[in-house]
Image: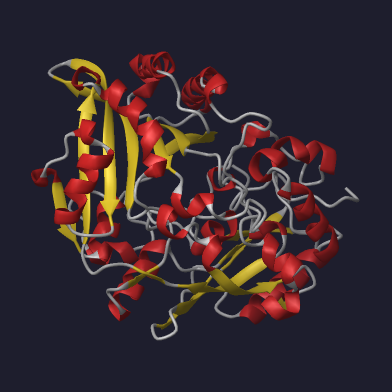
């Protein structure tokens, strides 16, 4: 892996300003690291000389419960943000992602969705202001950067435009008690019919109800089979949830014993990927997870996949490479269908019934082992092509996928970059390029999938 010439961990904005000026003078690129979940490693690797600016020391959170907003520095992790908000108020939250070790910088600037997306939309939809250091080393806020740049950094990827040191975000209301459940069904327990039914109804549920599906392979009594885990949070108590589920999704057979009432912050822990037995205090840890290798892809579904399509998908889970593979079906609808696709750069709104994250994991080191697993997920991705969005086949930028196209050391032309850019941003891509050309004409902030300028 290419190594940086330097790693900088600034405590102040002035140190980042100096890093930009000095790096430009010495022919070095900058890669900004906030949390470390970059799916393709673009925040900490480069094939050209570069430095890493790691924002881990910029972790201040200032919460105004009366006016329901917070200023969050760029090095804060999602788990810590939820934890600190809950300490101030049990009725407030922020609609961010599920994994607590994701950094707010990349998450907010790429869109950022979690269990509250049907109720409140994306993290980027709730950004009110930001502080960004541009390619000239100037510190700008919303007023001084202008509405075009402010639009671009809320879903278009901030790494193409500068270094964001802080975000002002709007907090949302949640009840003091919410309900969670996970109901697992295997193929032998009618999982195919349940998944097929879920596709037609999950995006129409009451917007207080979020039910996603986790598709995995399990071994039951020595037999390998596919399991669909219906993983849910409801913004209310069990006595309101049960009749709602009986009306909306009676086929699942949810009963009171499947459900648990929790505080919001406890539900955040329930949905996190932290090891079993983790506590609320673990939400504030930076690196609690073991090192793993993985490859991910994403898709958006607009028409339910027919049963034969699902059955063909399950066949892939018989392969050896699928031992730790996972598909995550996340429902849309609700607030997501009400926001215009041009409101921010994230365009995947009305018309999408759910989003799929394809994941494959492995433990072995070495290119030979990696290629075997990567080939598996590429074959699965090819198989599902007829069943997902078209013209373009859309993708989510926060699930970065270099298979979609790679810039030539960040100097790819607009036409070349459109191959992947339109998949991530649809018709918003051209406006992003216009903003990039205006604020960073020399294309200093660039990576393998950064927004290009028209001049390159």
Q: Is residue 101 visible?
A: yes
Asked if one can make out residue 138 in the rendered structure from this viewpoint, the answer is no
In the depicted view, which residue is nearer to us: 395 or 174? Answer: 174
Q: Residue 364, located in which quarter of the rendered image?
A: top left
Q: Is residue 201 left or right of residue 295?
A: left
Q: Residue furthest front?
A: 247
- What is the count of numbered marks? 0
State the residue at coordinates (63%, 45%).
2
Residue drawn where x is 39% and y is 32% of the image = 199
Residue 335 position in % (x across, y down) = 47, 55
Residue 348 picture location, percent across and down: 58, 45
Q: Is residue 12 above or below residue 434?
A: below
Left or right of 144, for residue 336: left
Which residue sits furthest right? 455
- State the residue at coordinates (40%, 19%): 310
Say which quadrant the N terminus sits in: top right
Name the residue rendered at 20%, 37% in the picture: 183
Q: To which quarter of the image does residue 140 belong?
A: bottom right
- Please state the horizontal and vertical placement of residue 19, each as a whole percent of the image: 70, 71
**Percent of width and height locating residue 96:** 43, 59
Classify residue 450 as left or right of residue 63: right
């Amino acid at each position: 892996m290419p190594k940086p010439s330097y790693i900088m961990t600034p405590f102040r904005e002035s140190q980042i300003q100096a890093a930009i000026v000095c790096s430009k003078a010495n022919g070095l690129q900058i890669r900004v690291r906030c949390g470390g979940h970059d799916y393709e490693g673009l925040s900490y690797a480069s094939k050209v000389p570069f430095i890493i600016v790691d924002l881990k020391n910029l972790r201040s959170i200032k919460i105004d419960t009366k006016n329901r907003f917070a200023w969050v520095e760029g090095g804060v992790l999602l788990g810590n943000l939820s934890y600190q908000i809950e300490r101030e108020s049990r009725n407030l939250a922020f609609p961010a992602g599920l994994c607590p070790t994701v950094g707010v910088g990349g998450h907010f600037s790429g869109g950022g969705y979690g269990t509250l997306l049907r109720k409140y939309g994306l993290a980027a939809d709730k950004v009110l202001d930001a502080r960004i250091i541009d390619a000239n080393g100037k510190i700008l806020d919303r007023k001084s950067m202008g509405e075009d740049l402010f639009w671009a950094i809320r879903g278009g990827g901030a790494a193409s435009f500068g270094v964001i040191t802080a975000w002002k975000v709007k907090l949302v209301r949640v009840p003091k008690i919410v309900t969670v459940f996970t109901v697992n069904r295997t193929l032998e327990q009618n999982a195919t019919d349940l998944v097929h039914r879920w596709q037609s109804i999950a995006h129409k549920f009451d917007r207080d109800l979020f039910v996603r599906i986790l598709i995995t392979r399990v071994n039951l009594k020595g037999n390998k089979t596919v399991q669909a885990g219906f993983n849910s949070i409801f913004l209310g108590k069990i006595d309101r949830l049960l009749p709602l589920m009986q009306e909306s999704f009676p086929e699942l057979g949810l009963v009171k014993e499947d459900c648990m009432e929790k505080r919001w912050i406890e539900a955040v822990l329930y949905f996190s990927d932290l090891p079993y037995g983790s506590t609320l205090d673990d939400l504030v840890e930076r690196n609690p997870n073991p090192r793993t290798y993985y490859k991910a892809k994403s898709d958006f579904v607009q028409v339910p996949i027919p049963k034969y399509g699902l059955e063909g998908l399950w066949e892939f889970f018989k392969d050896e490479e699928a031992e730790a593979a996972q598909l995550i079906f996340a429902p849309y609808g609700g607030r997501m269908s009400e926001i215009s696709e041009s409101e921010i750069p994230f365009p995947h709104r009305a018309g999408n019934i759910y989003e799929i994250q394809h994941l494959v994991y492995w433990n072995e080191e070495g290119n030979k082992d990696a290629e075997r697993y990567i080939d598996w997920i590429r074959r699965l991705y090819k198989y599902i092509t007829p069943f997902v969005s078209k013209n373009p086949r859309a993708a989510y930028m926060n699930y970065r996928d270099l298979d979609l196209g790679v810039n030539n050391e960040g100097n790819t032309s607009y036409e070349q970059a459109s191959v992947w850019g339109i998949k991530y941003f649809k018709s918003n891509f051209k406006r992003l390029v216009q903003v990039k050309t205006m604020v960073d004409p020399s294309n200093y902030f660039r990576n393998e999938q950064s927004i290009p300028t028209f001049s390159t």
